Image: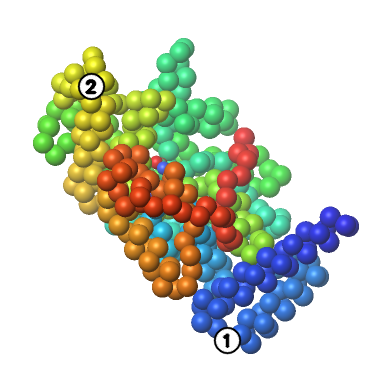
Amino acid sequence: MMMTTTTAKKIAEQATAFLGEAYYELGKSEEDAKRRIEQALEQIERTGYYSHSYEELKHGAKMAWRNNNRCIGRLFWQTLEVFDARDVVDENDAANRIFKHMSYATNSGRIRPAITIFPANHSHNRLRIWNHQLVRYAGYRKNNVIVGDSASLAFTEACQKLGWSGEGTRFDVLPLVIQMEGKAPKWYPLPSETVLEVPLTHPDHIAFQQLELQWYAVPFISDMELEIGGISYAAAPFNGWYMGTEIGARNLSDIDRYNQLPTVAKLFEFDTTTNTSLWKDRALVELNAAVLHSFKKHGISIVDHHTAAEQFLRFEKQEQDQGRAVTGRWSWLIPPMSPATNGIWHRSFDDAERSPAYRYQAAPY
Ligand code: ARG
């Protein structure tokens, strides 16, 4: 009882703060805000929770993007498309909503930022998406070698336990796994029209294609919790578009991921016997040039890290003009390549966490 009271009190506080801020930003009168807050508080008193109107949900999801200290792409926070899936009752329905979101966002390459929001955590229809991203490559440990994406080892194993099996290539797309509260998880192969992939070629080194590298077009983060005004949504997959270095300087380059720098260096005949040849740096440049070139060639939205940083600094200015101070985490905002060539490097940021927010949550498997 005590517990419930404390929780309800906290939700009431968060609801008041969020609704006040959101209604102000949406240009509503103080009267309207006051009336809405009273109504929400009354619902919290009665049930322990309150439900967001679509407008509140939509603006809250955008605010959470705007508040995300790790994201360099926040200039576009207002363009987020918000799909309301709080009415889903089963896994098939949820899977179909996700497939629709994926097709909408992919848009044949002209990527559109979007989020689909499933029932809140206090709803009896709450669910979890097990995937870290809706599209991701499997990782297999065979003897002592890893095939595919090492970041997916645990999830790949979980999928296999559920009865899925992959071909065993470096780029097997994992299935979608959805779990309704209190039920066994269900898995679904992703329909081919929901997964756009990009074979990597280099702008002037034709042999690059022999490396047979590829990546998927759209990053859909599906394991973060969205919290808006005290209400949490454990299933709220969202997407933007890629910044090239995420793929070229991390996913394909990290030693414990695809570790392609030695391979690229060999192809370009850089001297890998000494650090002073800067073969790693040179390979990074070529691999990242290939990523940007290939996405562009296939008409798929992507941003380079220089442009993204300029956009971020514009975002900061835009926020200041609105009377809001931007928070940020410097170590995440600087790009993993040539960071000091980039305006963000020379700045510092307040890393305070604001609400609404996207937050990490424990994996359900
Ligand atoms: N860094 C992650 C990846 O490489 C994706 C994170 C979200 N990125 C984005 N551009 N919205 O898959």
Residue under the point 72% across and 63% down: 11
Q: CA distance from mark 1 to mark 2?
A: 64 Å
Q: Residue 193: x percent and y percent?
A: 35, 48
Above or below — where is 337 with respect to 23?
above
Q: Nearer the viewer, residue 9 or 326?
A: 326
Other residues around mark 1 within 10 Å, as few (<14) / some (14–19) / many (≥20) = few
- Of the numbered discs in the image, which one, if any, rests on residue 206? none
Which residue type does callout 2 highlight? Thr
Ligand 1: does it lie within 8 Å of the C-beta at label 2? no
Mark nearer the N terminus (1 vs 2): 1
Residue identifier under label 2? 276
Which residue type does callout 1 highlight? Ser
Residue identifier under label 1? 29
Above or below — where is 235 with respect to 288?
below
350 on left or right of 207: right
Q: Quadrant of ligand 1?
A: top left
Q: Nearer the viewer, residue 114 or 341?
A: 341
Residue under the point 58% across and 28% down: 161
The N terminus - image quarter: bottom right
What is the count of numbered marks?
2
Q: Residue 194, can we see it?
A: no
Q: Residue 94: x percent and y percent?
A: 55, 53
Residue under the point 72% across and 78% down: 39
Task: Assign a secondary structure to mark 1.
Answer: loop
- Observer-side mark, 1 or 2, equals 2
Quadrant of the rendered image containing residue 337 = top left
The C terminus - image quarter: top right
Tell me how the rendering is colored. rainbow
Q: Nearer the viewer, residue 306 or 231?
A: 306
Residue under the point 35% across and 50% down: 346
